[in-house]
């Protein structure tokens, strides 16, 4: 089956974007391999260290998706993205603009501004956002390559709390919708894929698992299952019993 | 003598007054807090809550919660891993001067304590920084005694500029200053400011801080807010536990951080959890009031109340406590610590005496290894100055 994830013309076989934060550096390689991930996110601020640089632990051949975490406004996100390109992290960038230290919710307005600037500079911009249809449309117009709505606050492992709103984005936005943040279990990743998400990004759920490589593999399988189910056309679910005498029974012929 | 002392609630000329809305709320919260009224049921409710209210936080600091230490530690650990994963940040403090104009009766640096005073010059600071950077550390916390005369803002700024050459992250623990001075130091490369309020009981504060600008209680209490307004990314809070009722002071510390975070949601929040330590020439000062279980309770309460806050564990505590608390709640640990002036360079001799006695003298390599052995990831920096 030729089912590729295409982001700005780049093709990927895997629909699992793995985060590299919050766990021991030595485990990154095994996690990537077990996840079958072809894209790995990393906080550029973690790649700004001279000792134990996270970049040294990421297997070759995996596409780097540096994020701008630490940016509190568009201007800072732009500066971090440019720095990321300078240090050789490539053209992909995940925009994270957060100025809320408690819930780490993204600022859609600043994210749109940063997306517009960076897309013009040739970056492949993947904005992390709160699932708001109007903001998503603005991101498309600003030149985003994908839209990455959150399922729940970062690190919360609460699942897809914003399910109905992500569904709207999937229906209305023509770019790949990648569910990012909040997914805590493989079953939730599967659910996102069944809904028609193009990919799932997860970090904390894997990083806080007892066996990190094994959990990476579990996510991989769940994402594949969800994708296959989506492509197969989901079976009909009857929510309520139907009335026994049809309302249209009065019609003749 | 008593009459000559300045009023501890009145700002001195040159001290910027940004208003007292947060201060008033913190003081009120502290005054209203009655640790003894909480019951075991309050504690279990607090531990069940998804996001804790100030009332819940009060429950976790109460004597009733003393019987729930294991449950608190479990919840704290889950929150720490959820928000920080396995990362433990490493840093070291660098004392560049110990001149002090304050008379704080519990502190080794106080202006009447006969100790060797010293101040490092630019060249000496650079040597110290080089020596620290050679150990692999990428975060430094610059400290001075509180003397504007001997360690003026330009002097601290010089140290910040040097520090940005050798380190990724530069923090400050110096005397409180005005917003424009914080802005200047931010431009020199500093991004984090920690100010210990010592105690949030202003009456008690007055009896402990007899002379110097530190005597002015409200100016100190509002330092974090001025630092944020001056552009600093993060601010740190602490009460010196044991000076007054530690439960009330810990509660006030948490409320202070909580209110600052509400008003400035982008600010990074950090806690330190110092207990009194013995100092040179004063045998009466010792940390007998706050024992390890109480300290653990306070640290876990901070973690559960503000799960996203950075918590630093000091070398005032012993190796055993530190190695265990990083598994549970602390996310930042110092290593290779020297609290004297000029002790990092080769001969290790001090130009000026230490502020207090440390309990964990391990070097960077040893602490790094200890973190690894807990299955955690030592992180030298995860920060970009923007």
Image (cartoon, helix red, strand yellow):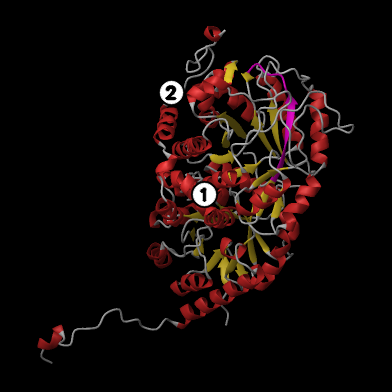
Say left or right for A188 vs A207.
left
Secondary structure that dominates the magenta span = strand
Question: Against B123, is B57 above or below?
Answer: below
Q: Quadrant of residue B220?
A: top right
How packed mark 2 is, by other alpha carbons closer than 10 Å (few <14, some 14-19, many 20 or more), is few
Residue at horizontal 25%, vertical 83%? A241
Which residue extends farthest bottom?
A253
Is residue B69 highlighted in magenta? no
State the image coordinates of residue A54 (x, y, percent, origin top left).
71, 55
Question: Against B190, is A169 above or below?
Answer: below
The front one of B119 and A11 is: B119
Residue B202 appears in the rendering: yes
Is residue B92 highlighted in magenta? yes
Q: Secondary structure at mark 1?
A: helix
Q: Quadrant of residue A39?
A: bottom right
2 or 1: mark nearer the eye: 1
The front one of B262 and A58 is: B262
Location of mark 2 (residue)? B19
* Residues at marks 2 and 1, CA–CA distance in whole angstroms: 37 Å
Range drawn in magenta: B90-102
Q: Give the number of the disc on residue B278.
A: none
Question: Against B112, is B59 above or below?
Answer: below
Residue at horizontal 74%, vertical 57%? B373
Q: The C terminus of chain A is located in which quarter? A: bottom left
Q: The N terminus of chain A is located in which quarter? A: bottom right
Q: Earlier in the sequence, mark 2 or mark 1?
A: 2
Q: Chain of mark 1?
A: B
Residue A104 appears in the rendering: no
How packed mark 1 is, by other alpha carbons closer than 10 Å (few <14, some 14-19, many 20 or more), is some
Q: Secondary structure at mark 2?
A: loop
Q: Give the number of the disc on residue B66.
A: 1
State the image coordinates of residue B55 (x, y, percent, origin top left).
40, 44
């Amino acid at each position: 089956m030729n089912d590729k994830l295409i982001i700005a013309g780049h093709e990927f076989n895997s629909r699992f974007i793995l985060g590299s934060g919050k766990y021991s550096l030595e485990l990154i390689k095994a996690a990537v391999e077990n996840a079958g991930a072809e894209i790995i996110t990393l906080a550029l601020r973690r790649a700004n260290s001279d000792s134990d640089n996270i970049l040294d632990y990421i297997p070759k051949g995996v596409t780097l998706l540096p994020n701008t975490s630490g940016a509190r406004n568009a201007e800072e996100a732009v500066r971090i993205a440019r720095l990321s390109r300078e240090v050789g992290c490539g053209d992909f960038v995940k925009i994270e603009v957060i100025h809320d230290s408690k819930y780490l919710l993204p600022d859609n307005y600043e994210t749109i501004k940063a997306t517009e600037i960076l897309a013009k500079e040739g970056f492949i911009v993947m904005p992390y956002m709160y699932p708001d249809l109007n903001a998503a449309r603005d991101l498309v117009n600003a030149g985003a390559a994908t839209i990455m709505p959150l399922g729940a606050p970062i690190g919360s492992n609460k699942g897809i709390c914003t399910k109905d709103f992500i569904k709207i984005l999937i229906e209305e936005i023509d770019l790949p919708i990648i569910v990012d943040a909040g997914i805590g279990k493989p079953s939730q990743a599967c659910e996102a894929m069944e809904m028609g998400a193009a990919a799932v990004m997860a970090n904390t759920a894997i990083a806080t698992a007892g066996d990190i490589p094994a959990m990476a593999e579990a996510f991989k399988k769940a994402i594949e299952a969800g994708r296959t189910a989506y492509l197969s056309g989901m079976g009909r679910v009857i929510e309520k019993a139907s009335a026994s005498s049809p309302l249209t029974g009065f019609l003749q012929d | 003598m008593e009459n000559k002392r300045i009023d501890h609630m009145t700002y001195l000329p040159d001290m910027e007054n940004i208003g007292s809305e947060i201060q008033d709320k913190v003081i009120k919260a502290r005054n209203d807090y009655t640790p003894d009224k909480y019951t075991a049921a309050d504690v279990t409710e607090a531990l069940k809550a998804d996001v804790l209210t100030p009332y819940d936080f009060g429950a976790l600091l109460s004597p009733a919660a003393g019987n729930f230490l294991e449950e608190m530690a479990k919840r704290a650990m889950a929150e720490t891993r959820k928000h920080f994963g396995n990362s433990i940040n490493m840093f070291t403090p660098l004392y560049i001067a110990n001149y002090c104009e304050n008379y704080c009766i519990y502190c080794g640096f106080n202006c009447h304590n006969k100790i060797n005073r010293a101040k490092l010059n630019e060249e000496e600071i650079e040597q110290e920084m080089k020596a620290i950077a050679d150990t692999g550390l990428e975060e430094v916390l610059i400290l001075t005694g509180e003397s504007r005369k001997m360690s003026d803002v330009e002097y601290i700024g010089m140290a910040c500029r040097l520090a940005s050459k050798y380190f990724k992250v530069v923090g400050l623990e110096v005397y409180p200053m005005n917003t424009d001075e914080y802005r200047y130091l931010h431009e020199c490369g500093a991004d984090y400011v920690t100010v210990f309020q010592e105690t949030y009981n202003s009456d008690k504060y007055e009896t402990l801080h007899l002379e110097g600008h530190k005597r002015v209680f409200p100016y100190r209490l509002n330092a974090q807010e001025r630092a944020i307004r001056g552009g600093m990314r993060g601010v740190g809070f602490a009460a010196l536990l044991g000076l007054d009722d530690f439960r009330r002071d810990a509660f006030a510390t948490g409320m202070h951080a909580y209110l600052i975070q509400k008003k400035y949601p982008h600010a990074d929040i950090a806690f330190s959890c110092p207990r009194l330590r013995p100092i040179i020439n004063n045998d009466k000062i010792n940390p007998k009031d706050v024992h390890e279980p109480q300290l653990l309770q306070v640290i876990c309460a901070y973690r559960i109340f503000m799960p996203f806050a950075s918590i630093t564990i000091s070398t005032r505590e012993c190796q055993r406590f530190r190695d265990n608390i990083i598994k549970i709640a602390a996310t930042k640990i110092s290593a290779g610590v020297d609290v004297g002036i000029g002790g990092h360079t080769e001969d290790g001799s001090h130009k000026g005496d230490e502020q207090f006695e440390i309990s964990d003298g391990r070097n960077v390599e040893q602490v790094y290894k200890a973190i690894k052995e807990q299955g955690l990831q030592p992180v030298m920096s995860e920060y970009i100055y923007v």
